[in-house]
Amino acid sequence: MSLTILLIEDSLLLRELLGELIEGAFPNVCIERAASAEEGLKMLGNGHAVDLVLMDIGLPGMNGLDATRGAKRIAPDTQVIMLTQYDCKEYRRAAEQAGAAAYVGKRDAARVLVPTIESVCRATGRQL
């Protein structure tokens, strides 16, 4: 069974670029996409089997920190990697407190996201 990643990002362009990056690195991974926290949480609540969530922190409506807390309540075993353009100590701490397993700045995503996904999966015994 392949790993399923839910990508929650409000920017269509970035959602597609990140999806392509992940598909290129992990061809057997299934990627679900959501444009808002509410849409992503609805997918989780409707029983979508998701192993990993890539969560934008700066979403319209519900922000990524609150959405991470919600995702962990709905699916406690689902891992969350926070994606953000705000790469600072305060956001890193807040993401960790919300239940995120890792934190990736969008500026570094092309270089750091794939190894971060590998690391989180390895730490939780998930196969890529």
Image (cartoon, helix red, strand yellow):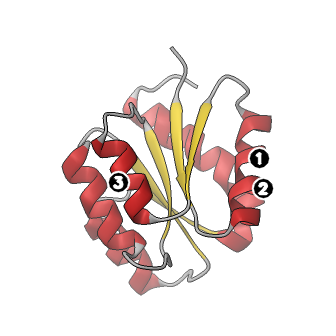
Going by the numbered disc 1, the residue's amino acid type is Leu
> In 3D space, how far apart are the residues under numbered discs 2 and 1 (Cα atoms)?
6 Å
Residue at image x 34%, y 65%? 67
Residue 122 appears left or right of 14: left
Residue at image x 51%, y 32%? 4
Q: Position of residue 45 (x, y in %)?
A: 28, 44
Q: Which of the 4 image quarters holds residue 91? A: bottom left
Q: Nearer the viewer, residue 124 or 8?
A: 8
For the residues bearing labels 3 and 1, Cβ distance under 8 angstroms: no
Residue 65 appears left or right of 32: left
Q: Which residue is mark 3?
A: 41
Q: Position of residue 63 (x, y in %)?
A: 40, 76
Q: Residues within 10 Å of mark 3 (few under 14, many from 20)?
A: many
Q: Which mark is residue 21?
A: 1
Q: Position of residue 49 (x, y in %)?
A: 38, 30
Q: Which mark is residue 17?
A: 2
Residue 110 vertical position relative to residue 125 in the rendered view, above or below: below
Give the foreground label among 2 and 3. 3
Q: Nearer the viewer, residue 83 or 17?
A: 17
Residue 20 vertical position relative to residue 70 in the rendered view, above or below: above
Question: Which SS class for mark 3?
Answer: helix
Going by the numbered disc 3, the residue's amino acid type is Leu
Residue at image x 77%, y 47%? 21
> In 3D space, how far apart are the residues under numbered discs 3 and 1 (Cα atoms)?
23 Å
Quadrant the C terminus occupies: top right
Going by the numbered disc 2, the residue's amino acid type is Leu
Q: Position of residue 3 (x, y in %)?
A: 52, 27
Question: Which SS class for mark 1?
Answer: helix
Q: Earlier in the sequence, mark 3 or mark 1?
A: 1
Q: Is residue 101 visible?
A: no
